[in-house]
Amino acid sequence: MPKPIDFDPDSYAPVAARVELFYERYPTGRILTELVQRTDQEIVFRAAVYRAAEDREPAATGWAAERVGDGEINAVACLENTETSAIGRALANLGFLASRLRPSAEEVAKATRTRHRLGAEPDLRQLLRTAERAGLESSRVEALRARIARGLQPAELAEVQHELRRFIQRRMEDHAARAARGG
């Protein structure tokens, strides 16, 4: 049985919100989708977004691929889910994020399913080890290890990864500056 999707949908924009914003701004716009590939295992869609009905070239495009049966949604509506994801990508590429975060709720759900299917924890533990070697306080390291052990929502995971990468980058820059000064 598939694992539950572990993300906070309120933190992400559903594609429907992006579509609504698009048509508010471009009332004569068009969203066209194309089924590019359909096999027993995978479905691929391309979406093209046009700002006006008379536009010959799309203002943005988006692609999506989903695995048939991957999670509860794709077990029953993989075709529809893939098309919706492609539309969401095209609208995001045009700037319709409907949220401060780029991924849509549908995309985060897909990433979560993929992570569970592969049994792979993103590089968070490696980042934490690198940050620890770079001098991250031991109390902070232990607090993060405890959070990781409890499980992080995708938005939390991305935030922690970003913070660790920034910390490591600052340490590298500090080290380079000291080396340039000869100390």
Image (cartoon, rainbow, N blue to C red):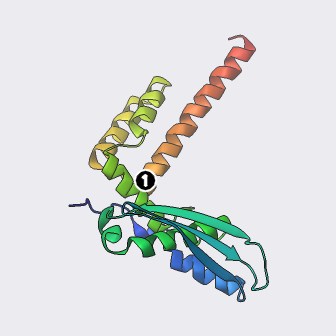
Residue depicted at 33% across the width and 44% down the height: 148
Q: Position of residue 73 (x, y in %)?
A: 34, 71
Quadrant where the N terminus is found in the figure: bottom left
Q: Which residue is mark 1?
A: 156
Q: Is residue 155 visible?
A: yes
Residue depicted at 57% across the width and 39% down the height: 166
Q: Closest to the observer: 40 or 79?
A: 40
Residue depicted at 37% across the width and 60% down the height: 41
Q: How many marks?
A: 1
Q: In this picture, is 182 found above or below 167?
A: above
Quadrant where the C terminus is found in the figure: top right
Question: Is residue 23 shown left or right of residue 164?
Answer: right
Question: Is residue 17 shown left or right of residue 60?
Answer: left
Q: Position of residue 28 (x, y in %)?
A: 72, 88
Helix, strand or loop for disc 1: helix
- Of all residues, the one furthest to the bottom in this rendering is 27
Q: Quadrant of residue 67?
A: bottom left
Q: Closest to the observer: 50 or 153?
A: 50
Q: Position of residue 38 (x, y in %)?
A: 45, 66
Q: Position of residue 89 (x, y in %)?
A: 58, 66
Q: Quadrant of residue 52?
A: bottom right
Question: Is residue 91 shown left or right of residue 9?
Answer: right
